[in-house]
Image (tube, helix red, strand yellow):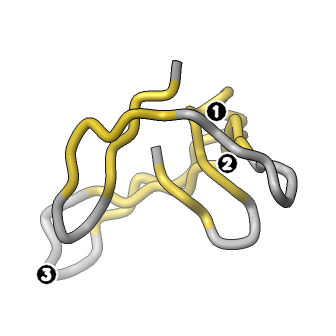
Amino acid sequence: MKVVANLGLCISVYDIRSIDGGFVFPGDGASTYTVEFRLVMFRPFVGEIIAAKLKESDSNCLRWHIS
């Protein structure tokens, strides 16, 4: 899960609409695709409280367990 600014918490990928490309750029060994997809987002209301337990944390993120 990831928080996306001004959208909310990304829960999962809902579906993939299209995949185009398959380019390999010079100096880069990876193939690059343009993907159109929809996400399941969670955007709480102002003042809404969510009960969760902290699973782990590091300098990059916090992982929560929401029942």
Task: Tell me if label 1 and label 2 are in contact, CB under 8 Å.
Answer: yes
Q: How far apart in space, not on screen, are marks 1 and 2 (Cα)?
A: 6 Å
From the viewer's side, name the closer residue of 63 and 46.
46
Q: Residue at x 50, y 27 (%)?
A: 66
Label 3 Cα neighbours within 10 Å, binned few <14 / some 14-19 / many ≥20 = few
| Side (left or right) of 22 relative to 45 | left
> Whole-percent x and y of residue 67?
52, 18
SS of the residue under disc 1: strand
Which of the two discs, 2 and 3, labels the residue nearer the N terminus?
A: 3
- Give residue 25's position: percent from left, percent from top: 28, 75
Q: Position of residue 29 (x, y in %)?
A: 13, 64
Residue 44 coordinates in the image, percent (x, y): 78, 48
Q: Which residue is mark 2?
A: 36
The structure residue drawn at horizontal position 19% and vertical position 70%, both measured from the top left corner, is: 59
Image quadrant of residue 31?
A: bottom left
Q: Which residue is mark 1?
A: 16
Q: Secondary structure at mark 2?
A: strand
From the image, tell me which residue sits under label 3.
27
Crowd rating for badge 2 (residues with CA inside 10 Å; few <14, some 14–19, many 20+): few
Q: Is residue 64 above or below residue 23?
A: above
Upstream in sequence: badge 3 or badge 1: 1
Q: Is residue 48 left or right of residue 16?
A: right
Disc 3 marks a residue whose amino acid type is Gly
Q: Amino acid at mark 1?
A: Ile
Q: Residues within 10 Å of mark 1 (few under 14, many from 20)?
A: few
